[in-house]
Image: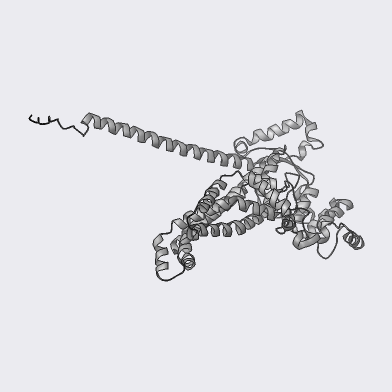
Amino acid sequence: MTATAPEKTEPQNLYPTDDEFVALLNRRSRKSFLAQSGFLLALIIAVLALFTLLYTVINDAFGLVAIVNAQDPETVVAEFGLDPDTTTLGDLDKDQLVGLLQGAVSSGVGRRLEREERFYPDRLVFESQEKWDEICASGEPPEGCTGGVRNQADVLALVRERVVQPDVIASNDLVPSLLDRQGFEQSVLEAFETSPQRFGDYTVDQVRFEWRAWLNLDFIRSPQNSTPELAGIRTAILGSTYLVLITMLFAIPVGVGAAVYLVEFARPSRLNEFIQTNIYNLAGVPSVIYGMLGLAVLVRTFEPLTSGSLFLGEGAASNGRTILSGGITLGLLILPVVIISAQEALKAVPNSLRQAGLGLGATRWQTVRSQVLPVALPGILTGGILAVARAIGETAPLIVVGAAGFITSDPTGPFSNYTAMPIQIFQWTSLPQEEFRNIAAAAILVLLILLLTLNATAVIFRNRFSRRA
């Protein structure tokens, strides 16, 4: 039986024809165009959303107002023999402002104000020394007996509230004010004619139209007030500053230390994998859960510590709802983010640096301290600052932990009652008066400026330490 030779087959053409190649190229170009168009559309939507946010906030923070004063600031300045064209109410010294208060408020109101906070450290204005010594020696002395002294800005705020008594009866946004100023003024004057009962005892002759920048130095320097024309954000700025300091002091050392151990010293094991997995999970937990944790643990369980009674005794806060509790709660919130960002920065350091250090006889800690951490420092700082920037804008955990919605006294330490800028903005936007919406927009601008400053600081630190490394 003879074997038959296998049949020869024609070799297959593995290359496409010209028409097939053109079709493939066109299909690939269409997919590339669609992908590029989708990314461009996403960019346009993001830019439009950011522009809409900025436009809305800026439009609400500036504009025309119709204002009525019980006593015009120019008249008050002129009574001191000063030129109102060159001198403002804020240029008066503290003694002149206190004198205005003495002539404008009753003795009972003056005593109440002085018991809240003294005007001078060495003398009294509305209260006799004998009566003052008596009330300060009582079982529950007022805050003025142990608190600070009002500065010029505080007295100026009282003069505006008690003497000038400004009342914004109508406000207009920035763009409508620029496009149709006469229309706004005419609508206010017509409202006086059609419904005068809406404006109480005010007359049309008392109305003054002026440009109002709700974001100004007086707004930043003034404390909270129930009158929107006089309310400021100083107390909230100081509260946010204390919160940031406590958050950084807690989260960054703990987070960086945990990251260094997990990357440089921990041996691979199921326990370490379990810890690492839960760190990633904790980074996605809603912020209000951290607020509940802070309420249960810091405010209630560790109340003697967080209220300060363990150190200050009777001079401590009445409960644990203090800046210390809020700062540690925010520190717990950003701790997973700090750990993860520090881990990524450490993993980006080439292993050749570690091997070189160990090869020269250095211990592992000496290698980490002298070689690894300096190289990873830009990434660690960037991640830490961005995490703190996130904490500044948090509202839910602070509400749960007990930040005050309305407080007029500035925080003086970690055991003080406090408020924060997000809390203040939330509280203002929930009030019915239209003017609170304007000052809420001004507060949002302050918060945005602070966040942009922190982000710019992160970029500067990253670039500076990257050049050194």
Residue 238 relative to residue 100: left or right = left
Can you give x and y, in whole percent of width and height, for residue 224 in the image?
A: 73, 49
Can you give x and y, in whole percent of width and height, for residue 390 in the image?
A: 58, 49
Q: Residue at x 85, y 61 (%)?
A: 124
Q: Is residue 405 above or below residue 15?
A: below
Q: How many marks?
A: 0
Can you give x and y, in whole percent of width and height, for residue 186 in the image?
A: 69, 33
Residue 92 visible to the viewer:
no
Residue 294 visible to the viewer:
yes
Q: Residue at x 72, y 56 (%)?
A: 306
Q: Is residue 271 above or below residue 56?
A: below
Residue 335 relative to residue 91: left or right = left
Could you say which is closer to the camera, residue 166 or residue 354?
A: 354
Q: Residue at x 39, y 68 (%)?
A: 359
Can you give x and y, in whole percent of width and height, for residue 38 in the image?
A: 42, 35
Residue 417 relative to residue 177: left or right = right
Extreme left residue here?
2
- Image quadrant where one finds the N terminus: top left
Could you say which is closer to the camera, residue 146 or residue 272?
A: 272
Could you say which is closer to the camera, residue 104 or residue 353?
A: 353
Extreme front residue here?
1
Picture quadrant where residue 57 is located: top right
